[in-house]
């Protein structure tokens, strides 16, 4: 397929928006998992159990066990589903798409076939998309480029 400069610009910018969104999703998950893990595994949190009101004392061990199980589940998700690896993948792809846009910006028209090959190479590295976030990136890019008619 022969892409125009505008097509390549749109698709490159859309991919940057998309990978920023995915980076944010995985980054937030990793940050909250780290926060919860450090907090709930600390000796200070364990000491809180002894300070619970009397009405909660019969449930103290169950509550602490459930919180510990929750933290274990979060940490297991990070490891089992490769959350950090996915975060890095989207970070790297965002950087590569930004570099692609830089190359497109300075490319003369006679170099567009080379830029299109670069586009195809980058596109081949894309993981399966999160359709909702990809659609949102598509809409954000249309809006950013002024390709959307404002609603009255």
Image (tube, rainbow, N blue to C red):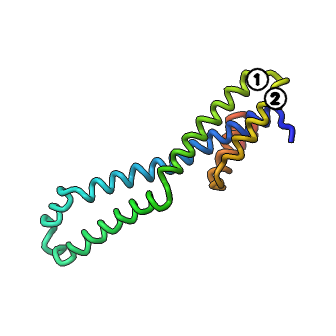
Which dot marks residue 112? Answer: 2
Q: Is residue 39 left or right of residue 124?
A: left
Foreground: 152 or 123? 123
Tell me the residue that label 1 is attached to.
107
Q: Secondary structure at mark 1?
A: loop
How dense is the environment of label 1, judged by Cα within 10 Å: few (below 14), some, or many (20 and up)? some
Q: Are marks 1 and 2 in contact (CB under 8 Å)?
A: yes
* Figure quadrant of the N terminus: top right
Q: Residue at x 81, y 25 (%)?
A: 111
Q: Residue at x 51, y 50 (%)?
A: 85
Foreground: 106 or 64? 106
- Residue 71 appears at what percent x and percent y? 34, 62
Q: Secondary structure at mark 2?
A: helix
* Figure quadrant of the C terminus: top right
The residue at the far bottom in this view is 58
Residue 59, compared with residue 74, is above or below; it is: below
């Amino acid at each position: 397929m022969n892409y125009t400069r505008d097509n390549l610009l749109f698709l490159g910018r859309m991919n940057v928006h998309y990978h920023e969104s995915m980076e944010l999703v995985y980054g937030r998950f990793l940050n909250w998992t780290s926060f919860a893990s450090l907090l709930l595994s600390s000796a200070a949190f364990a000491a809180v159990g002894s300070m619970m009101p009397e009405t909660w004392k019969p449930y103290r061990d169950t509550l602490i066990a459930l919180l510990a199980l929750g933290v274990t589940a979060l940490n297991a998700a990070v490891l089992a589903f490769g959350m950090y690896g996915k975060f890095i993948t989207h970070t790297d792809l965002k950087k590569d798409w930004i570099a692609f846009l830089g190359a497109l910006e300075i490319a003369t028209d006679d170099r567009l076939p080379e830029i299109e090959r670069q586009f195809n190479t980058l596109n081949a590295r894309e993981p399966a998309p999160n359709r909702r976030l990809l659609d949102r990136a598509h809409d954000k890019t249309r809006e950013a480029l002024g390709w959307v008619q404002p609603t009255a």
